[in-house]
Amino acid sequence: MTTPVILHFTPNQQDYAKVLRLFFIQRTSTRISLGFLAVAFVLICYGVIARGVSPSIFELIWLLLPPLFVAYVFFGQPARMAKQAVQNEQLVTEATWQVGEAGVEISSRFGSTLMGWDTLKRMVTTKEYYLLLSKVNKNAFRFLPQRAFSSPEDKERFLALVRQHLPSA
């Protein structure tokens, strides 16, 4: 039996903005939308260049839509949601994660939640964060900043537990 890993951290507004960007790019719907807009953008650019005339208003809209969509999805929306998150005291209080054989228990002064391994779909690893994606609710995730680890040994034990319980990790 593996010893549980206990981690402490206090999330901030920057954490929420960054992980929301990471979460949005992981979503299939975002990727499909970006692909569709990229194809439309390329086709409109090709049509305008091939004709050698000024773009119509319709073409201008399609030339502006992809960059505006990217700016909104990856900058505007995460910044707005992060600002809302830090106004909720429960989301910016110190959290304690206990990661063990039963799953991930997250507690704070407001209460605790146990997420069993069977409720987690997979873990996304980035340079600064680990995102645990939910199987049950595709719009739900939990994040753990890498700064929460007090030692390389804790990080390795955490990763070993995740690999053991989440095959796609």
Image (cartoon, rainbow, N blue to C red):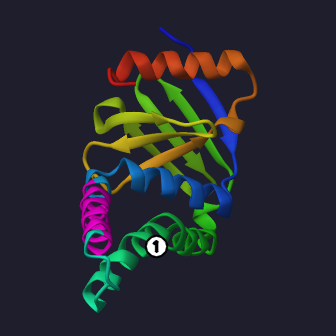
147 or 2: which is nearer to us? Answer: 147
Q: Position of residue 119 (x, y in %)?
A: 30, 38
Residues rendered magenta in the picture: 32-49
- The residue where tag 1 is placed is 72
Residue at image location 61% in from the left, 51% down from the top: 108
127 or 86: which is nearer to us? Answer: 127
Classify residue 60 by image quadrant. bottom left
- When the figure is inspected, residue 111 is found, relative to residue 162, above or below; the finding is below
Q: Position of residue 21 (x, y in %)?
A: 50, 57
Q: Position of residue 72 (x, y in %)?
A: 46, 73
Tag 1: amino acid: Tyr
- When the figure is inspected, residue 44 is found, relative to residue 17, above or below; the finding is below
Label 1: how many residues lie within 10 Å, few (<14), some (14-19) or many (20+)? few
Q: Main secondary structure of the magenta part?
A: helix
Q: In the shown orientation, is residue 24 left or right of residue 148?
A: left
Residue at image location 35% in from the left, 86% down from the top: 54
Q: Position of residue 144 (x, y in %)?
A: 58, 41
Residue at image location 50% in from the left, 15% down from the top: 160
94 or 34: which is nearer to us? Answer: 34
